[in-house]
Amino acid sequence: MHIELEKRARVSTLFSIFSPLLALALTLVFGVVMFWLLGKSPLGALYSFFIEPLLEVWSLHELAVKAAPLILIAVGLAICYRSNNWNIGAEGQFTIGAITGSILPVMNPEWHSPMILPLMLLMGMAGGALYAAIPALLKTRFNTNEILTSLMLVYIAQLYLDWLTRGPWRDPQGYNFPQTKSFQIEAVLPEVLSSGRAHWGFIFALVAAVALWFMMRFMLKGFQVSVLGQSERAGRFAGFSARRMVWFSMLLSGALAGLAGISEVSGSIGHLQPSISPGYGFTAIIVAFLGRLNPLGIVASGLVLALTYLGGEAAQLSIGISDKVSRVFQGLLLFFVLSCDTLIHYKIRLVVAGAKAAEVRS
């Protein structure tokens, strides 16, 4: 006896539209069960996660700070996934973008010029794109699986950052803390409003989302992404190159991840240190799928996932839970998003050996 997935002849439009909401509702239900098993008040926990972070102006700014890298990375990943290229290494591209973008303020701390910040952003994008070019090259040249190569490169990037901040780039006047010198004022991404910490990285994220939505909706390149993602053979008949699409999607997603990395370091932290991300590159995968791989939907899902980060921090203080609980929350959300999407497009068949196949309609 075994289970098979059979593609549905028709996909329900209604369920496709409301699938993310259903996944979110199921996450809340199972979250309530999880908090109850932990001995915490479910209503109090949900209040800490989803309401408490929205009650103060400063926490709304923190929401924008945490949503910015998630949205930037996720809109790039959405283009990759819609073209059937599976970049799982955005966390490494985020880290390399932060490193390459920080070269100028770390190596030239006395340079005070209005040009330094634009150059940092461009270098961050270039670093992320070049790091994403490694799995792109391996896939197009040697047919290597980009999931494995991009994922393994994450750990190389993180160890390289750790070595830099503990070794050659460590601030000699930093009381032996593993971090670089603080960036000069010209190298700091400015705040959008004076009422909080939200910086221009959030504006970059919104602009990227709108630009890529426009590309997917109205431009030939967006049509190529959709066609090659659905059928590479059909794309070849139309004259589209799958090899070029690998390069385009990987470089684009890497550049946006690199921009997110240098924006986070320049706008939120102010220097390089061994840990610059709570896992934005991996969480952005959830954001991309929760947003239905639609750049505008990703803006909303990025805010929701950013809220779970803030809510997790608030819940640690108010009800005394571990930060791992927020990771479980995010994992549940991804599980239900993928499960709902799978059941929308496929039905489950229970096949019994030696007997007529029984179908379990889902």
Image: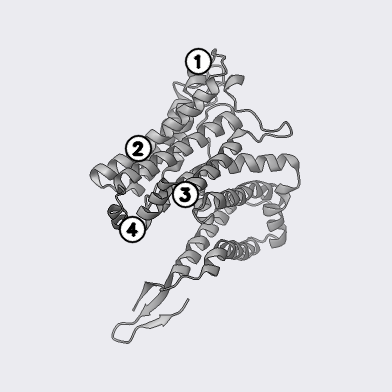
Q: Residue at x 41, y 46 (%)?
A: 221
Among numbered discs 1 and 2, the one appearing first in the sequence: 1
- Residue 108: mark: 1
User: Which quarter of the picture shows residue 227?
Assistant: bottom left
Near mark 2 (Cα within 10 A), the count class, few <14, some 14-19 or many ≥20, is many
Q: Nearer the viewer, residue 300 or 10?
A: 10
Q: Quadrant of the N terminus?
A: bottom left
Position in image of residue 158 (x %, y %): 44, 36
Asked if residue 9 lies left or right of residue 182, the reply is left
Alpha carbon distance from label 2 to label 3: 22 Å
Near mark 4 (Cα within 10 A), the count class, few <14, some 14-19 or many ≥20, is few
Name the secondary structure under disc 2: helix
Position in image of residue 173 (x %, y %): 56, 17
Which residue lies under the disc numbered 4?
231
Which residue lies under the disc numbered 3?
216
Which residue lies under the disc numbered 2?
133
